[in-house]
């Protein structure tokens, strides 16, 4: 449950940042989001 909430917050903050600085943040968030999803899936 905690992990799911964390993921939602990450998605929201990434979306907000992407609206402001589209290209750079989108790339960073995309890589971070993918990495955290893979990590969480394997670990939990």
Image: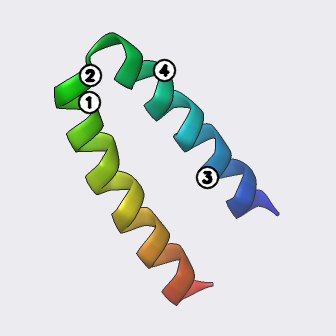
Specify the color scheme.
rainbow
Which residue corresponds to the image point at 39% horizontal and 16% vertical from the top-left? 19
Residue 42 on image: x %, y %: 50, 88
**What is the secondary structure assignment of the residue under circle 2?**
helix
| Residue matched to label 4 | 16
Which residue corresponds to the image point at 53% horizontal and 75% vertical from the top-left? 40
Earlier in the chain: of badge 4 and badge 2, it is 4
Label 3–label 1 contact, CB within 8 A: no
Picture layout, residue 14 above or below residue 10: above
Residue 15 on image: x %, y %: 48, 29
**Quadrant in the rendering for residue 34:** bottom left
How far apart are the two marked residues, 3 and 4, measured between alpha carbons? 14 Å
Label 1: few (<14), some (14–19) or many (≥20) C-alpha neighbours in 10 Å: some
Between label 3 and label 2, give the one nearer the viewer.
Answer: 2
| Residue matched to label 2 | 22
Earlier in the chain: of badge 3 and badge 1, it is 3
| Residue matched to label 3 | 7
Which numbered marker is on residue 42?
none
How far apart are the two marked residues, 3 and 2, measured between alpha carbons? 20 Å
Label 3–label 4 contact, CB within 8 A: no
**What is the secondary structure assignment of the residue under circle 1?**
helix
**What is the secondary structure assignment of the residue under circle 4?**
helix
How far apart are the two marked residues, 4 and 2, measured between alpha carbons? 10 Å
Label 2–label 1 contact, CB within 8 A: yes
In the figure, is residue 15 to the left or right of 3? left
Q: Quadrant of the C terminus?
A: bottom right
Which numbered marker is on residue 25?
1
Which residue corresponds to the image point at 35% horizontal and 66% vertical from the top-left? 35
Picture layout, residue 41 above or below residue 28: below
């Amino acid at each position: 449950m905690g992990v799911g909430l964390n993921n939602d917050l990450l998605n929201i903050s990434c979306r907000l940042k992407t609206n402001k600085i589209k290209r750079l943040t989108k790339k960073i968030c995309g890589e971070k989001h993918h990495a955290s999803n893979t990590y969480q899936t394997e670990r939990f």
